[in-house]
């Protein structure tokens, strides 16, 4: 990919007139680079403008891109096609164009594939369509006497009298009538149609509203962040505070400072479905909700939100990782909440880490970024140690709340009965908690009822036909599910191998099965299950959180979703059912991630007046992760992790890139992987491991092989990768995916 100039200043005037008529347009497609088009005479176009251009037999929107520094091969003028027209959307700012180029270069993606994430709402690029609204006709009163005024019709007229003209659907909803009633009134001449601009549903957050009364630690951190937001300039700050320290309140002060300075703010969160409490707090502080950005928006909401960001009308956006590619013209602050969270890594399409790319965007924009967490990633801690990032600490919980007491339950010494999963100690603690009228949480990172189903007679295991994976029993749905490809099937009546009827045994627990065990022990305890398949989307998740807040539930049983940010004042007990679950397997970050997850779940206990307790069930009580949880000595644990990684040259002390070869035919995949292995870069400081079959050797019917490139930290890993993989063309449905800084090794 040719390097591009950083500034959007026009290139020196080309010698020929025809060259001046040429513009480079980046299309939201995985192409090598921008395509040349001819500008219609008289139309001035500048880099960043969004234009409609022909491609093949269709038309699509692209962005006028900056001129390249180096000679790019020119298409003959005679073959150029015309730009159709400029679209009435705000141009993409220069910083965003540079960001697109940077992300493409770093992740080895086509720039157009990155641009596609920016131009994610093609509808938002066209002019806003005015909507038809209804007002009361001037002679409505007179006409009203001539027609039959039902109660429903009267309600519509009353609703109209109390406000501006509104769309028919909105009027109907407000008056509590069917849309037909409004249509009927319009036909009878009591309503008059007018066109209005669509209302902007986003109120401006008011930074003048007062902050809460801060503790001295909080006040110091808030003042530091607010000064950075006010003054601008690139900086990265880790806000490192224990769970319940009030980190959110503190960084909201920086948000206020950025708003006051007239800048926009982006807050990235790992799981947008779980932001109900966060939104409530934001609204309490600023008197308005921020603009949300996530995959659950309706097309109309997406369009409005994208446009509002581009026009600077949306001042604060809270979103999942894709919000990083929104076209903010005045971005002044980025916050990455729960910066350690693995879900910031995008695994499909353009493979990127939203936290890392957020730092890049902040650098290009020249603005501060705040990384927030109680359990920082080793990457971030290392950057703080090296002086690249600054660090602010909040060592205590807000309001005098203490951190919970953590008990490690040795499952070898104190095991549950067979086919049960609650140790006697945890069972007793649950009983005491319910007795005291308090709430509890059980954490088990396994969805469904049982992870494995076996035939009692012949031992046959129910596997996914498309994946190297067991089928998971989901009793609530009465189905078996593959968690990798989404296949669902009914439990067979007889064993497919030996033919024995009703022979299947469920092995091991999932959250549903845990619920069964709790119900048997505590029939009066009201429990709810919190997983990605019981709570689909923000509405369901918000409803669930509300039920916990209103004490309609005594117990929450859930997967990692329960670890994320919740604040339930009455929750005093957390039980970790299987602390060892994440430690198996060859994942580089297994220990680090398990520590983060368990510390975060533990942090849900005892956040208000009542003290909290945590029971961690493990077969490895001597494991460093358990030791760190009990002692609370996080930093020593991280230092040991860092030492081990440094010794092996692993991230963050070395660079990794994974190359995943996949395809429907095993032979073709192996051949391609081996060919890649033979051509692998050989240079000092670079090592290529594999090819070898992936641990998940087959997913969705595709066979998978992997290579792992390991390089010294000081090396630019992209250049050799590009030289190696650039010329490779895969055949027979084989795909080659590159994952820079991989987080998944499956
Ligand atoms: P963290 O994000 O660090 O886990 P939170 O920001 O969720 O902590 O704070 C925990 C609770 O304490 C929240 O209910 C929050 O509103 C409250 N809180 C924190 N700081 C203050 C403060 N200075 N004044 C009033 N309430 C606060
Ligand atoms: Zn499958």
Image (tube, grey):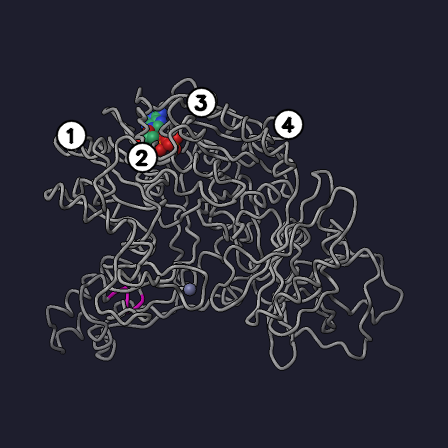
Disc 3 and disc 4: Cα gap in Å?
Answer: 21 Å
Q: For residue 702: magenta?
A: no
Residue 542 in view here: no
In the image: residue 233, left or right of residue 121 = right
The residue beneath circle 2 is 617
Alpha carbon separation for disc pair 2 and 3:
19 Å
At x 15%, y 46%, the residue is 519
Residue at the image point whose x is 39% and y is 39% from the top? 580
Q: Is residue 75 above or below residue 418?
A: below
Q: Is residue 334 above or below residue 681?
A: above
Judged by depth in the image, the label closer to the viewer, 3 or 4, is 3
Between tags 4 and 1, which lies in front?
1
Q: Residue at x 29, y 55 (%)?
A: 448
Measured as percent of width and height from the top left, residue 300 is found at 41, 64
Measured in 3D between alpha carbons, the distance from the residue under mark 2 to the one under mark 1, in whole angstroms, is 18 Å
Spot occupied by residue 134 in the image (x, y as percentages of width and height): 30, 69
Residue topped by disc 4: 386
Span colored in magenta? 167-171
Mark 1 and mark 2 in contact (Cβ < 8 Å)? no
Q: How many marks?
A: 4
Of marks 4 and 2, which one's residue comes earlier in the chain? Answer: 4
Residue 130 is at least partly visible in this image? yes
């Amino acid at each position: 990919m040719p390097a591009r100039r950083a500034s959007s200043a026009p290139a020196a005037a080309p010698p020929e007139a025809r060259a001046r008529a040429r513009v480079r347009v980046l299309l939201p497609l995985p192409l090598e680079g921008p395509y040349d088009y001819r500008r219609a005479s008289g139309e001035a176009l500048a880099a960043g403008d969004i234009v409609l251009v022909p491609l093949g037999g269709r038309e699509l929107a692209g962005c006028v891109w900056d001129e390249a520094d180096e000679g790019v091969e020119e298409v003959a003028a005679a073959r150029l096609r015309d730009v159709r027209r400029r679209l009435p959307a705000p141009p993409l700012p220069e910083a965003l164009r540079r960001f697109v180029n940077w992300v493409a270069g770093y992740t080895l993606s086509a720039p157009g594939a990155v641009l596609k994430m920016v131009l994610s709402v093609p509808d938002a690029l066209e002019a806003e369509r005015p909507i038809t609204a209804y007002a009361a006709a001037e002679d409505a009163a007179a006409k009203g006497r001539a027609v039959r005024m039902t109660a429903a019709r009267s309600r519509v007229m009353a609703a109209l009298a109390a406000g501006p003209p509104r769309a028919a659907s909105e009027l109907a909803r407000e008056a509590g009538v069917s849309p037909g009633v409004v249509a009927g009134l319009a036909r009878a001449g009591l309503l008059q149609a007018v066109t209005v601009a669509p209302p902007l549903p986003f109120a401006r957050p008011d930074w003048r509203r007062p902050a809460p009364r801060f503790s001295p630690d909080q006040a110091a951190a808030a003042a530091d962040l607010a000064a950075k937001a006010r003054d601008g300039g690139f900086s990265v700050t880790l806000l490192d505070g224990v769970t319940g320290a009030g980190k959110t309140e503190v960084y909201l002060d920086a948000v206020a400072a950025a708003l006051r300075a007239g800048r926009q703010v982006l807050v990235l969160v790992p799981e947008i479905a779980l932001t109900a409490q966060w939104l409530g707090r934001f609204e309490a502080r600023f008197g308005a909700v921020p603009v949300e950005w996530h995959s659950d928006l309706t097309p109309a909401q997406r369009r409005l939100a994208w446009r509002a960001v581009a026009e600077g009308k949306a001042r604060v956006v809270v979103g999942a990782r894709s919000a990083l590619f929104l076209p903010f013209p005045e971005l002044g602050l980025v916050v990455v909440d729960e910066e350690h969270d693995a879900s910031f890594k995008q695994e499909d399409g353009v493979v990127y880490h939203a936290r890392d790319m957020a730092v890049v965007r902040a650098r290009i924009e020249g603005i501060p970024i705040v990384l927030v967490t109680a359990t920082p990633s080793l990457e971030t801690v290392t950057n703080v140690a090296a002086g690249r990032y600054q660090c602010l600490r909040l060592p205590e919980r807000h309001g005098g709340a203490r951190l919970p007491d953590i008990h490690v339950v040795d499952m070898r010494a104190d095991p549950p009965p067979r086919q049960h999963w609650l140790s006697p100690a945890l069972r007793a603690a649950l009983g005491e908690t319910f007795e005291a009228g308090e709430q509890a949480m059980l954490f088990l990172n396994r969805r469904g009822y049982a992870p494995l189903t076996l035939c009692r007679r012949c031992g046959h295991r129910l596997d996914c036909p498309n994946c190297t994976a067991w089928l998971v029993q989901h009793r609530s749905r009465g189905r078996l599910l593959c968690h990798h490809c989404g296949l669902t099937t009914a439990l067979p009546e007889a064993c497919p191998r030996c033919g024995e009827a009703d022979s299947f045994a469920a092995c091991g627990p999932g959250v549903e099965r845990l619920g069964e065990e709790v119900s048997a022990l505590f029939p009066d305890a009201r429990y709810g299950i919190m997983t990605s398949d019981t709570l689909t989307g923000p509405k369901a998740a918000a409803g669930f959180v509300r039920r916990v807040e209103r004490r309609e539930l005594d117990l929450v049983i859930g997967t990692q979703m329960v670890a994320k940010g919740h604040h339930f004042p009455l929750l005093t007990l957390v039980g970790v059912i299987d602390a060892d679950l994440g430690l198996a397997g060859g994942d580089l970050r297994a220990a680090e991630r398990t520590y983060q997850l368990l510390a975060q779940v533990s942090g849900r206990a005892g956040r208000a007046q009542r003290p909290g307790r945590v029971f961690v069930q493990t077969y490895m009580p001597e494991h460093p992760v358990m030791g760190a949880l009990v002692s609370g000595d996080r930093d020593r644990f991280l230092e040991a992790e860092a030492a081990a990684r440094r010794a092996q040259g692993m991230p963050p002390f070395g660079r990794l890139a994974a190359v995943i070869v996949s395809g429907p035919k095993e032979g073709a995949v192996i051949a391609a992987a081996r060919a890649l292995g033979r051509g692998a870069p050989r240079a000092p400081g670079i090592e290529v491991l594999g090819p070898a079959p992936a641990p998940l050797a087959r997913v969705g019917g595709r066979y998978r092989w992997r290579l792992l490139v390991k390089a010294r930290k000081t090396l630019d890993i992209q250049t050799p990768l590009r030289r190696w993989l650039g010329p490779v063309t895969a055949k027979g449905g084989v795909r080659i995916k590159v994952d820079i800084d991989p987080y998944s090794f499956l």
